[in-house]
Image (cartoon, helix red, strand yellow):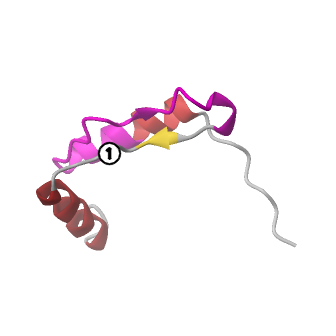
Amino acid sequence: MATKKPDVDPYTAVETLRTVLTEVGIVLPSLRVDPASPQLNLVELGRVHSNVADRLAQALQRGGRE
């Protein structure tokens, strides 16, 4: 039986993700904790230009290495 991982603080998750993305030159302007449903610990990534989405995909394929 799989064990459930403990919830991660959404504010910590947002700041960690923002830091890591910044290190590879990617900015998600709308990145934030979802204020509409705090009990669900949702993070809103927002909409981005297609160039940013492509750079994000490339960074993930490289494992974040430039």
Quarter of the figure with residue 53: bottom left
Question: How far across and how far down the image is residue 22, in percent?
Answer: 23, 41
Query: How many numbered circles are shown?
Result: 1
Quarter of the figure with residue 46: top left
Question: How far across and how far down the image is residue 36, in percent?
Answer: 56, 29
Is 16 one of the magenta-colored residues? no
Left or right of 38, for residue 63: left
Left or right of 8, for residue 64: left
Q: Which residue in the rendered view is the most extreme toward the right?
A: 1
Left or right of 7, for residue 57: left
The kind of residue tagged 1 is Val
Question: How far across and how far down the image is residue 28, in percent?
Answer: 26, 42
Quarter of the figure with residue 42: top right
Q: Which residue in the rendered view is the most extreme toward the front?
A: 36
Q: Which residues are magenta?
A: 17-40
For mark 1, what is the residue? 20
Residue drawn at 31 percent across, 35 percent down: 30
Q: Nearer the viewer, residue 24 or 26?
A: 26
Residue drawn at 42 percent across, 38 percent down: 16
Secondary structure at badge 1 equals: helix
Examine the rendered structure and indicate whether residue 2 appears above or below residue 14: below
